[in-house]
Image (cartoon, rainbow, N blue to C red):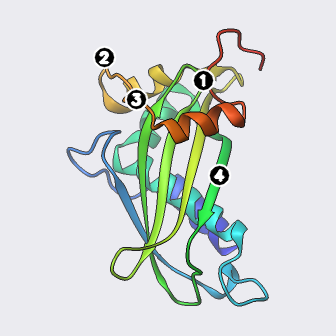
């Protein structure tokens, strides 16, 4: 429940924009592992990683003044797919830095990478997120339109996705297809 409150706060009362930061810049969020994040084995529960990443994505949007820009358009983000790789366990009171960055987009989704590290940049977990954006009416908003608004530049072009990310997107059926079935 604590992370849900933290997410609500990060979204409804966002931190200040970081001047000069754009959609391709990395955003960092620092947290401490709390008792509510732990499972019976006394390390962070896999669901808690995802909740911590939710907070970090809201902070990323706040850093680029994205929350206000999305609200003004009536748009909001949803996770279409995610995958996690766990490298090292996080334990109670560990200080965790979550680095969030946009990897690129296609006609359906925006792809983000979130890396969770602790002391000396030791990688603990990495997640890939495929995010969709919806309007108030529930209709999908084209990722290019979202990134253009977030970056204040209608001519932004997506970098090429790394092949492993593109393969994952095809495997979980979120990648762009010539005929969109969903």
Cα distance in 3D space between marks 4 and 3: 19 Å
Q: Nearer the viewer, residue 143 or 8?
A: 143
Tell me the quarter of the picture where residue 103 sits.
top left
| Vertical order, 155 against 12 (above or below) | above
Q: Which of the two discs, 1 and 3, labels the residue nearer the N terminus?
A: 1
What residue sits 69% from the left and 82% below the top? 36
In three-dimensional space, the C-alpha distance between marks 1 and 2, rounded to whole angstroms, equals: 18 Å
| Disc 3: which residue | 160
Is residue 156 shown left or right of residue 48? Answer: left
* Residue 99 relative to residue 76: left or right: left
Q: Position of residue 128 (x, y in %)?
A: 56, 49
Vertical side of 76 occupied by 119: above or below: below
Instruction: Give the residue at the far left of this rendering.
Output: 20
- Which residue appears at 53% of the width and 53% of the height? 11
Which mark is in front, 2 or 3?
A: 3
What residue is pinned by disc 4? 83
Q: Nearer the viewer, mark 2 or mark 4?
A: 4
- Residue 44 percent across, percent down from the top left: 65, 79
Q: Quadrant of the C terminus?
A: top right
- C-alpha distance separating marks 1 and 3: 15 Å
Cβ atoms under marks 2 and 4 closer than 8 Å? no
Q: Name the secondary structure under disc 1.
A: loop
Q: Secondary structure at mark 2?
A: loop
Residue 109, percent from left and from top: 57, 30
Q: Secondary structure at mark 3?
A: loop
Q: Please give the label number shown on residue 155.
A: 2
For disc 1, the neighbor class at 10 Å (few under 14, some 14 to 19, many from 20) is: many
Q: Which numbered disc, 1 or 4, marks the residue closer to the eye?
A: 4
């Amino acid at each position: 429940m604590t992370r849900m409150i933290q997410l609500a706060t990060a979204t409804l009362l966002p931190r200040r924009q970081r001047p000069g930061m754009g959609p391709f810049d990395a955003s960092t969020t620092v947290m401490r592992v709390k008792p509510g994040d732990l499972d019976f084995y006394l390390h962070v529960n896999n669901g808690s990683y995802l909740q911590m990443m939710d907070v970090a994505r809201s902070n990323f949007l706040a850093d680029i003044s994205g929350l206000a820009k999305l609200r003004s358009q009536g748009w909001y983000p949803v996770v279409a797919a995610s995958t996690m790789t766990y490298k090292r366990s996080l334990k109670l009171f560990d200080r965790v830095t979550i680095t969030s960055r946009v990897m690129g987009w296609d006609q359906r989704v925006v792809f983000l990478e979130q890396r969770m590290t602790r002391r000396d940049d030791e990688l603990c977990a990495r997640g890939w997120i495929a995010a969709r954006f919806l309007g108030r009416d529930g209709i999908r908003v084209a990722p290019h339109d979202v990134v253009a608004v977030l970056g204040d530049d209608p001519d932004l072009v997506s970098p090429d996705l790394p092949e492993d990310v593109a393969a994952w997107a095809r495997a979980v059926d979120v990648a762009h297809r010539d005929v969109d079935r969903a």
